[in-house]
Image: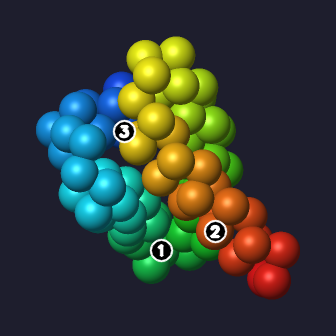
Amino acid sequence: MVEKLVARVMAELKRAGRDREKVRLALRWTMFSLEMSAGREEFSEEYRDWIMASWNVALLLALDQAVAEEEYEWASECQSLLSECQFIEEEV
């Protein structure tokens, strides 16, 4: 799952280019679509938690890959979203 998410994130980042707003929107849209995929079934909360944990790992790996490729706009937005996700998890 994580490898597919990293590939999806990197594809979205490449499509967005270096425009920070497009990068931010691409990452947030991907995260939103993942959250919505959990649905409202009986085990959806556990599934959502698993998806979001996988998302955080994928973002960390995408961050590393962005730095390796010297795409610092991507890295910055990945780091920003990671920090935001961590803050939200700590509040819950």
Residue at disc 2, secondary structure: helix
| Residue 17 sits in quarter | top left
Residue at disc 3, secondary structure: helix
Q: Which amino acid does label 3 sit on?
A: Val
Pointer 3 local density, CA inside 10 Å: few below 14, some 14–19, many at least 20: many
Q: Residue at x 34, y 31 (%)?
A: 10
* Mark-to-mark CA distance, 3 and 2: 17 Å
Does the CB distance between marks 3 and 2 fall below 8 Å?
Answer: no
Q: Which of marks 3 and 2 is nearer the N terminus?
A: 3
Q: Residue furthest bottom?
A: 91
Pointer 1 local density, CA inside 10 Å: few below 14, some 14–19, many at least 20: few
In the visual, does 73 lie left or right of 89? left
Frontmost residue, 15 versus 53: 15
On screen, residue 68 above or below 20 = above
* Image location (x, y in percent) of residue 64: 59, 26
Residue that mark 2 sits on: 84
Dividing the image into 4 quarters, which one contains the C terminus? bottom right
Residue that mark 1 sits on: 41
Q: Which of marks 1 and 3 is nearer the N terminus?
A: 3
Q: Which mark identifies residue 85?
A: none
* Image location (x, y in percent) of residue 78: 52, 48
> Can the viewer see residue 37 in this picture?
no
Q: Which residue is drawn at 45% across and 66% down?
A: 35
